[in-house]
Amino acid sequence: MRMENLAPAGNWESLERAVAAGADAVYLGYAAYSARAGAGNFDRRQLADAIAFCHLHHVRVHVTVNTLVKDSELEGVEDVLRMLRGLGADAVLIQDLGVLRTALKCVPGLAVHASTQMAIHNASGAAWCRSVGMKRVVLARECSLDEIRKAAGTGIEVEVFGHGAQCVSVSGECLFSSMVGDRSGNRGRCAQPCRRDYLLRGQRGAWLSPRDVCLRDRLDEVAGAGAVSVKLEGRLKRPEYVAVVADSYRRGLDGVADGCFHPADSAEKTQLLQMFQRGGFMDGYAFGAEDAGVIAPERVNHGGVLIGTVEDVSGRLAKIRLAAPLHDGDQLRLEGGHPDYEMLYAGKETPTGGIATLRLREDARVRRGDRVVRLTDSALMRWAQELPQRTIRVTMIFRAMPGEPLALTVSDGTSVVTVTGGIAAEAQKRALTEEDAVRSLGKTGDTAFTAGEIRVTTARAFVPVSELNRLRREALEQLANARRDAFAPEPGASFPQDELILPAGKLPTTVLFRAISQIADVPPDARLVWSPEDWRETPLEEGLAALPDGVWLQLPTVSEEQTLQDLRAFVLSHRDRLGGVMLGSVGQLGLDWRLPIGAGSGIPVMNRRAAQFLFEQGCAFVTASPELTGGELRVLLDGDPPILVPAWGRQQLMLLHHCPARTLLGLREGHSSCALCDRNSPDSLRGLTLDDPRGYSYPLQRVRLPEGCLVRLLNERPTDIRREVARAGWPMLIELTDEDGFSGLDGRETTSGHWKRPIE
């Protein structure tokens, strides 16, 4: 199977450029329920036109419906899913489990892809997705090549992010934008707090801002691991970016398919860098990027391409020595020991090695030796804008014989249509010649078709030019429809939504803790759930031995497949001591734990359909999303279903795969064997905070796995809605992070979270 070149389409212009550049498929958002609300997205009419355009060119259309939705929105989402099936969308990307259940039950003919927001990161997760009826999984960006290979081995289609910006948090596990500003990344409204400067041990930098990934030179290895699609990020990027990146990956993927793959040459690499990059490109987690190799703390905007150096400044004129050609209309940035100075170059084209003169504004603080970086290459932009649209080569067979109906057959090699006209008369004066017919039939105009072989059979027939043109137009229109029909997926049946039934059942107060010392004063009727800091074998065995019987174990949100299997073996060997397992991610549903299971906060429940799905999957309880208001929680918990409400705790804002402490040290390898925290090194993560220059301080907390650490970025203040939850009579979840014990929760500065603050 050829690996799919999957390009972003934030608007119509990007869609058109993606198809022109050789995309096999595009992904785009409907006007609602898309995780990139800032993109232009498509309304119903535009979406219908987009699908028709793409299917004409045999390009698939994947539509993102990958946000978490509230109960009040479920009916609207159902309508959208039915509309997508009716319009012929090739697939829908989903995060929300309630939306997933609706799609599988109501529109089973619509292919479902697990969005990367679902945080599927190992083979068990991929196998679970396949078992419930999903066709493809977009793997988490943090997967290694070996984990990609294992996931592909389960038989489900695997899609891998190949190029562009990366979320620093595990996708679907980021609440930073939501908790500090009410704009939820899980609802497509991320304000990107990761792209801001923070203080880390007093050093200022963008410590949460990853470099852009580029797998152009590793496509053969990605294909060899079993991935069927390489996804290019960029629904918020300009159309020219889409064209340049999709064109580059088209060349690479063609080489893979033809058995003659070559990495990009220097010119192609420069073009990719020129379109957008932060801190240069990285190979990503798939190929071992770690810590300082992931994060680019110097700047969060486009790094551009270095093209020269300032040699002299005189008044408002600067002379630069060029290491690359400079074009009229290029956007430049001059960097030095001063604020960056950006300008648009207007002047003659100057070749490599030449001297160009820049005219500066009066406020410019440019010095000799400053770097000259090109942000936008006007020549490359023109190339992307003028890249011709794909055309479909057709064969035409025309027959015009006196006394017979005119007949034109047109074929693209697969689809064939024939249109007929009136009875041809014998010419009294000028008969139609083969040359005349070829000339008229070859005028395909602004259609998607171009004429290849044209065969004409005629003998002294008279055919008006208008009739010949009509036959051509009608034949090409019918062929276009035939191509769309041949390529579009089968719509399948549609079914009504079933009854929403949730079990009822009271839950005890649930206390989630990390250290044994935290539970000394916990009420005796509380359910204890242990969330260890260290998941290696010895700390796990020793920790469980010191805990009372009946304690539950919360699994880590993310782990490699081998770690997950080892944890399952640990659980099975201690079934007599454990009360149950709280799952950390949806993919863990696929394993038989042989103990009661519950869905933890890593499996967000924002609506009753999501809760219904999890109960049907065997969960004894689920956990409400912390992004719900008090009013929305009342809807979710109507009838007293077994749903925990997070009532106390420092909310996890991000789950990081890089270690900020190691990044500060400039370390690019050794993540899995790191022992800084084990040795209590002063350079370790222990006690470290990420400080906003405005005065907010966010604690960092490690989760040690055998393959290395994850890092939790916690909210500055604990969320405390215990009084409100108790008044409502709901079961509460208390999470102890850095507290000494259960009785020390009062008297602290807290936040009520989203209790009264609805998210966008």
Image: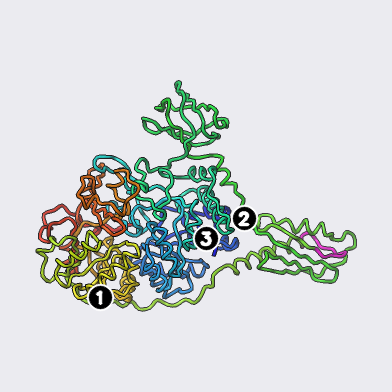
Percent coordinates x, y for residue 695 in the rendering: 22, 43
Q: CA distance from mark 1 to mark 3?
A: 41 Å
Q: Earlier in the sequence, mark 3 or mark 2?
A: 3
Q: Is residue 466 magenta?
A: yes
Out of 630 and 301, give the one closest to the viewer: 301
Q: Find the magenta span and give its range.
A: 456-467
The residue beneath circle 1 is 595
Name above or below for residue 651 compared with residue 368: below
Give the quadrant of residue 301: top left
| Residue that sits furthest to the right in the current view | 428
Circles 1 and 2: CB atoms closer than 8 Å: no
Out of 759 and 714, give the one closest to the viewer: 714
Q: Amino acid at mark 2?
A: Arg
Give the quadrant of residue 569: bottom left
Marker count (numbered): 3
Q: Is residue 527 visible?
A: yes
Percent coordinates x, y for residue 602 in the rendering: 29, 63
Q: Amino acid at mark 1?
A: Leu
Out of 259 and 621, give the one closest to the viewer: 259
Left or right of 732, for residue 478:
right
Circles 1 and 3: CB atoms closer than 8 Å: no
Residue 390 marker: 2
Name above or below for residue 289 compared with residue 546: above
Q: Amino acid at mark 3?
A: Glu
| Residue that sits furthest to the top in the current view | 314
Mark 2 falls on what kind of element?
loop
Left or right of 83, for residue 659:
left
Q: Is residue 463 magenta?
A: yes
- Answer few, some or many: residues within 10 Å of disc 1's Cα (few below 14, many 20 plus, some between 14 and 19): some
Mark 3 falls on what kind of element?
strand
The residue beneath circle 3 is 4
Percent coordinates x, y for residue 751 in the rendering: 20, 55
